[in-house]
Amino acid sequence: MSKGILIYSEVTRENYLHTVTFELANKARELAQKLSDCPIMALVLVKPDLIDEFKEVFRVNGFDKVFYVADERFRTYTTDIFAPVAIKCVRDIDPEIMLIGATNQGRDLAPRISSALHTGLTADCTGLDINESGKLAATRPTFGGQLMATILSKKFPQMATVRPKVFKPMKEFVNVDTNFVRMGYDFCGYKSKIEVLEFTKKITSEINNLDCAEVIVAGGRGMQSAEGFKLLKELADTLGGVVGASRLAVEMGLADKNCQVGQTGKTVIPKLYIACGISGALQHTVGMNNAERVIAINKDRNAPIFEIADYGMVGDAFEIIPKLIQSIKQHT
Ligand SMILES: Cc1cc2nc3c(=O)[nH]c(=O)nc-3n(C[C@H](O)[C@H](O)[C@H](O)COP(=O)(O)OP(=O)(O)OC[C@H]3O[C@@H](n4cnc5c(N)ncnc54)[C@H](O)[C@@H]3O)c2cc1C
């Protein structure tokens, strides 16, 4: 049987387990079935007062085994403390597969672990599977997003990072008899050279809760102007949603960068995604193709966005959207 799938469980600055942990756990469960139900394991580096609280969270999310190191030095993430401890743990746990969220912390940690263990790392995956030989098949965009490549690692552990929201979290809680293993390392000699003085929030020109929105009305180059985006905002407000954008719309100055959806923007999983004047380039759709429902409005009936849309409206967005707004208002 496989040695198991290890998920690095990041603790956020707000003292939560990052949601990507549960998205990866859900995917890992699917992968584990193809590996004779191998164990799903977590590694968490945590300050001591949090571990008891987290134990229940790991249990209900179906982790079979949780390895943890509890120490005051894990209060704030610093590379020079977390990386050597994580490397030591992964070396000892010796998993078959290791998955890490492509968050700021994960992106910092993952390559350090893979290089220390002389193994490969497939970053920013959009799909994970187990192939016929029982190897991790990690898919990600390549050649500037023109192609999707499925990458196999020759060495172990097979490592991959995945951005938050690429996979869905578990819908039903799976309560298992989780085994907790305290990694009792003596790392008293470890002292960080980094002192974190304070965190400052980046002030953006527009507050946009794209990450957790249930409805996103997104616009592309086809929306042409600030007027076009005003129309999108009106539709979004009517539906209680927020505005998203393609990269070209951002580059044209029609929307803020924090509204961008796609490979170099955000990955979103709303209940409804309305794509207006967006052609549907792969680099855009990798960021939204897990939306529950997609409606596309485009004047070109051959636009690729229609291939992934549940409903399509062929026509001029400037004519369709006002009618939509009016009709929604009449019916609500
Ligand atoms: C490395 C890399 C990373 C990238 N990352 C991203 C990313 O994160 N996100 C992203 O979005 N893109 C990204 N891109 C860019 C991507 O390849 C596309 O160029 C971009 O998504 C296209 O944006 P668009 O659909 O708005 O514009 P276009 O492709 O120009 O499409 C505009 C669409 O609007 C339609 N249209 C025009 N007028 C109207 C109208 N009046 N009514 C209705 N429809 C109309 C047209 O028929 C057309 O289909 C990336 C590219 C690279 C190389």
Image (cartoon, rainbow, N blue to C red):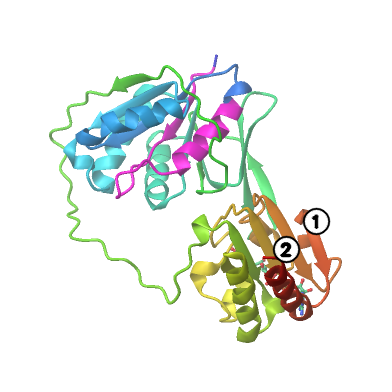
What residue does disc 1 label?
A: 307
- The answer to whether one can see residue 246 in this image is no
| Pick the front one: 322 or 108 | 322
Crowdedness near tag 1: few (<14), some (14–19) or many (≥20) residues, C-alpha within 10 Å = few
Q: Residue at x 58, y 80 (%)?
A: 254
First of labels 1, 2 by sequence position? 2
Does residue 152 appear left or right of residue 191 in this picture?
A: right
**Residue 168 spot, x, y in % from top left:** 57, 42
The reply to whether the C-beta atoms of the residues labelled 1 and 2 are less than 8 Å apart is: yes
| Secondary structure under the numbered disc 2 in the rendered image | loop
Q: Is residue 10 magenta?
A: yes
Q: From which residue to which does the magenta span run? A: 2-31
**Above/below status of 139 relative to 241:** above
**Residue 169 spot, x, y in % from top left:** 53, 39
What residue does disc 2 label?
A: 280
Name which residue type carries label 2: Gly
Q: Is residue 153 magenta?
A: no
- The answer to whether one can see residue 10 in this image is yes
**Above/below status of 245 relative to 322:** above
